[in-house]
Image: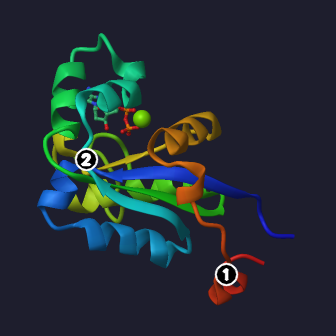
């Protein structure tokens, strides 16, 4: 019986776009076996950034975080697959790149928590809220790939 399918949101942050790592980062999720169901390039404005990072308001790093995520365009994507939320978090690596495992995105490409390349939803509730924050339902496409039966069975 195939594992339960989940959807989760990722954002390739401004440093990921500026460092030309969008293809590399999306490729890692494709190779892992996840399916892209939504994808776009946007420039996050301050109100959207404040909504996205509402849970961090009042923390010492909050102002810098809002500034960072609004600096330059980002790529937002919704990934789908078995255990997608946990699979993506593990592929992304720990919040602080200098502690993130080698082989993870942050562990391979980052050194500083203030430029940690990528956001990923951390739980089913946040995934649902964050997907809805960036995508209308008609921007998310449901489809199967021929390879999916070789990824989960
Ligand atoms: P994650 O992005 O791994 O889910 P988080 O939700 O705890 O991490 O924090 C959101 C972002 O805030 C994180 O990607 C980088 C920034 N951040 C977190 N803790 C920080 C700290 N101690 N100093 C500076 N920035 C921090
Ligand atoms: Mg988080």
Residue sitting nearer the eye, 21 or 141: 141
Helix or strand or loop: what does disc 1 sit on?
A: helix
Q: Mark 1 points at which residue?
A: 148
* Res 72 label: none
Residue 105: image quadrant is bottom left
Q: Residue at x 73, y 84 (%)?
A: 149
Up the image or down, 54 lies above or below 125; here it is above
Q: Residue at x 34, y 31 (%)?
A: 48
Is the CB of mark 2 within 8 Å of ligand 1?
Answer: no
User: Residue 90's spot in the image, x, y percent?
Assistant: 48, 54
Q: Name the residue under label 2.
A: 97
Helix or strand or loop: what does disc 2 sit on?
A: loop
Q: Indicate the quadrant containing the C terminus: top left, top right, bottom left or bottom right.
A: bottom right
Residue sitting nearer the eye, 118 or 11: 11
Task: Name the residue furthest front.
Answer: 138
- Chosen colour scheme: rainbow
Quadrant of the picture in which ligand 1 is shown: top left
Residue sitting nearer the eye, 95 or 7: 7
Q: In this view, does 31 lie to the left or right of 27?
A: right
Q: In this view, does 112 lie to the left or right of 8?
A: left
Q: Residues within 10 Å of mark 1 (few under 14, many from 20)?
A: few
């Amino acid at each position: 019986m195939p594992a339960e399918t989940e959807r989760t949101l990722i954002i390739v942050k401004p440093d990921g776009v500026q460092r030309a790592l969008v293809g590399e980062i999306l490729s890692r999720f494709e190779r892992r076996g996840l399916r892209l169901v939504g994808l776009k390039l946007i420039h996050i404005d301050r109100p959207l950034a404040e909504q996205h990072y509402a849970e961090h308001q009042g923390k010492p790093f909050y102002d810098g975080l809002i500034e960072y995520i609004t600096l330059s365009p980002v790529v937002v994507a919704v990934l789908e697959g078995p255990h997608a939320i946990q699979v993506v978090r593990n592929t992304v690596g720990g919040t602080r790149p200098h502690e993130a495992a080698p082989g993870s995105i942050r562990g391979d490409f980052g050194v500083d928590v203030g430029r940690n390349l990528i956001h990923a939803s951390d739980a089913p509730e946040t995934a649902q809220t964050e997907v809805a924050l960036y995508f209308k339902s008609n921007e998310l496409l449901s489809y199967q790939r021929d390879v999916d039966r070789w990824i989960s069975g």
